[in-house]
Amino acid sequence: MADDPQSRFEIVAREDFSDATYLLEVRHPLMARAARPGQFVIVMSHEHGERIPLTIADYDREEGTITLVIQAVGKSTREMQQTCTVGTHLYGMVGPMGMPSPLGKAKKVLCVGGGLGVAPIYPQMKGFKEAGAYVIAVIGFRTKSLVFWQEKFEACCDELILCTDDGSAGVEGRVTTGMELAIAKHPDIDECVAIGPPIMMKGAAEVTRPHGIKTMVSLNPVMIDGTGMCGGCRVKVGDTVKFACVDGPDFDGHKVDFDDLMARLGRFSSQEKAAMKRWSDECRMAKPVSPAGGKE
Amino acid sequence: MARKKTIRTIPQERTPVSEQDPKERVTNFEEVSHRYSQEDALLESDRCLMCPEQPCVAGCPVGINIPGFIQKINDKDYRGAYDVITATNLLPAICGRVCPQETQCEGVCTVGDTLEPVAIGRLERFVGDMAINAGWANVPYIEPVPFRIGIVGAGPAGMACAADMAKAGCEVTVYEAFHQSGGVLRYGIPEFRLPNPVIDAEMGNLEKLGVTFECNTLVGRLFSIEQMIDELGFHAVFIGTGAGYPSMLGVPGDSLNGVLSANELLTRCNLMHAREFPNYDTPMPPARRVAVVGAGNTAMDAMRVCLRLGAEEVYCVYRRSRIEAPARAEEVHHAEEEGVRFKWLTNPVEVLGDDEGGVRAMRCVRMELGEPDDSGRRRPVPVAGSEHDIEVDLVVVAIGTNANPIIGQTSKLALNKWGYIEADEHLATSMPGVFAGGDIVTGAATVIEAMGAGRKAARSMKHYLGIRDVDAPYFVDGADTLFGIDLRERNFVRVRVPA
Ligand SMILES: Cc1cc2nc3c(=O)[nH]c(=O)nc-3n(C[C@H](O)[C@H](O)[C@H](O)COP(=O)(O)OP(=O)(O)OC[C@H]3O[C@@H](n4cnc5c(N)ncnc54)[C@H](O)[C@@H]3O)c2cc1C
Ligand SMILES: Cc1cc2nc3c(=O)[nH]c(=O)nc-3n(C[C@H](O)[C@H](O)[C@H](O)COP(=O)(O)OP(=O)(O)OC[C@H]3O[C@@H](n4cnc5c(N)ncnc54)[C@H](O)[C@@H]3O)c2cc1C
Ligand code: SF4
Ligand code: FES
């Protein structure tokens, strides 16, 4: 296990789904063995970098790899889009963090992933499928060109409902539209899992609430250590305050205070904007880079 | 030896140490206290009475031979002084800086009955720093024993245990969740009190002993304590994961964006270098007027960090009075010099928000001390009608921590009712071969107590593994042969060869 540091956290594969979404496969045999659906890692791409949490989107115990699917939204994730090419190494990757999702004894499950939540829902869906449940997946994207992993989902679930905001592929509408369709067809769904931007998870929880379907959501507050030490990731669930990194990240969607979560996600927005601007100015000064980043 | 000293013949004044001017130092992260020069150290060493009953040694949680090393300084045998200290304490440059000496060795020093006590901490730091600058390290030749030891957490408790087990000849691996080792020394205590190069140098000594550090490893999640014993082949395991899990205020407005724990503030600033944002990517919350709730070391550090980051006004809000403040006296004094405004006997009841989810003010009540509570301290009670608002845009919470839950969540170890790991007087846990110590057993304490626990656990571990503890190896000055035999060649009894 005492790997040569040079060979640690090597990126062994990369795929670009669109100009904003990319996949990295990182070598970490021990973690591939330990990972469970619902867990995440914290990555530092270089010594001066931020610690950024990313959901484990898949893991391969034989190959010893961890799959991450990343949306380039700010400085760190865009910088990684440029620098993380096959054969390079992350400065650090720690995990698997968080409690594994409780894959209960549900017989019929609705798995909902929207935008950056599409990849993270995959291991949970697979977990439910392996536990013998009937799985209906709803995945949503803004438009057809952003769609990825459709076949991977189809190969693993019993029914797939693909939604796009503009109707360019699958059902027109947001994932909530797809969820309504699924619930209408299957009144006996006994559990729902929804992952995506907070506003989407909030909407999804409202869809299932009147039907009394238990709904788990995976929260993504700003984190630093991911070990329960800083309290930066605290979220309100019912009457209690929880630390998402050690008590979650999965919580009962009907109890989560999403407005609080969304307000807290804006904690550092002015600094994030400044960092982004400074970084893109620097990039413009430097040699031109291909917009899709360091594609192989 | 010179004639016997008495309280009348020793230098009466404690040798002062120069400090950065408060006005200057609040603008930087350079160290606040300078160290003794050789002349200072010699002068101060003259103040030690070499008491036969050695109260200071009893006052030291790890029992450093204090008059012993002070005598060596007095003899100008600085290397000898270092050897004396490191026989019990591996990290003098750290402990000399952060130990609460006034309640430990210096608190019971005989000289202190009449005059100011001997400046034991400053002398220890003098020796530790000299060792770092001169590159001394007591690296013994170690007879290997066929045992593998796993240490969880690279804080002071884990490091002390690692050092002792490595010296006993074991193969030691330390697992740390963060990307750097040091625990609170690295992420909590700011650089103006404990510069990173000092931590690096002391860690380097551990590496010279053959200890391997594996950072980025979250034990419990990547592998469990049970797996360390059953699958990874460790013969014994020490858990020193520290406290953590900060308490928040639990008043309305607690989750506003301008409210954060001192741990978060300090981790961002120290470990993640947010003070150098945007050269480092981690941001810091903007702060013009700050209220820090609490009056422990953590609170003092948070206040002094905020001042250095440019806050104009920093308040310390504490529900008891100054004498009950748990921070080291020196830290309170330093904070005061730097301009922190103390609001003793004051307690927050609500944090008031602005329109953008930030903080506008903190509503407080005044407190008065009532009847003594179970701890014997007078219980603070709110004064009716004393509500008032303190205008601030950042609230930092430093009111204590709870047990970190990860090891408890992922192992069958017995925990006490507060979630700390249950350990007996030998620091053995409920699982054979697994020992625990430091903040994760006692709750938040001190660096030296955590190190003491690490060493105690190491003794129990050796006992458990059947390793005979040779605490007094041969000293072979400068030689790497003994009786003509190459020390590195043979399995000698543990022999110490100064590097
Ligand atoms: C448990 C968890 C799992 C996640 N999984 C994924 C994933 O699989 N794929 C993915 O693309 N993203 C994921 N995220 C979000 C991802 O961590 C952030 O997008 C990333 O940190 C943004 O960094 P940036 O510098 O590029 O953007 P910034 O400009 O810094 O921020 C953009 C947005 O990201 C949020 N953010 C910033 N820093 C953090 C942080 N340290 N922790 C959490 N959020 C932050 C901010 O609220 C901000 O609105 C996850 C977050 C959490 C907490
Ligand atoms: C801001 C601050 C200032 C302080 N100032 C002083 C002072 O001046 N003097 C003094 O004597 N004391 C001081 N203290 C207290 C002192 O630092 C602690 O008592 C001491 O560090 C405890 O040591 P420890 O080894 O038990 O734990 P820690 O120092 O907390 O180290 C624990 C380590 O374990 C790691 N870890 C946790 N969980 C896992 C896991 N599951 N797997 C792997 N690694 C893990 C953590 O990341 C951490 O590095 C201060 C504390 C704070 C917070
Ligand atoms: S108690 Fe004070 S004077 Fe006596 S030996 Fe210790 S340091 Fe010296
Ligand atoms: S990220 Fe620090 S406590 Fe959760």
Image (cartoon, coloured by chain):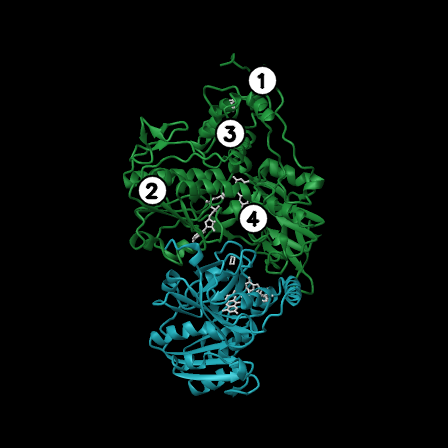
Mark pair 1, 3: CA separation: 19 Å
Q: Chain of mark 2?
A: B
Name the one closer to the observer, B72 or B427.
B72
Which residue extends farthest top?
B3
Q: Tell me where residue A65 appears, x and y as whole percent.
A: 40, 66
Name the one closer to the observer, B260 or A31.
A31
Q: Give the class, few, some or many, for how many residues have Cα within 10 Å of label 3's Cα (few <14, many ≥20).
A: many
Q: Give the class, few, some or many, for how many residues have Cα within 10 Å of label 2's Cα (few <14, many ≥20).
A: many
Which residue extends farthest left?
B466
Q: Which color was chain B given?
A: green
Q: Give the class, few, some or many, for how many residues have Cα within 10 Å of label 1's Cα (few <14, many ≥20).
A: some
Label 4 belongs to which residue?
Answer: B399
Label 3 belongs to which residue?
Answer: B105
Tell me the residue at 47%/77% (across/down): A112
Q: Chain of mark 1?
A: B
- Horizontal side of A27 relative to B353 (left or right) equals left
> What mark, if any, has residue B10 been given in the picture?
1
- The chain assigned the colour cyan in the figure is A
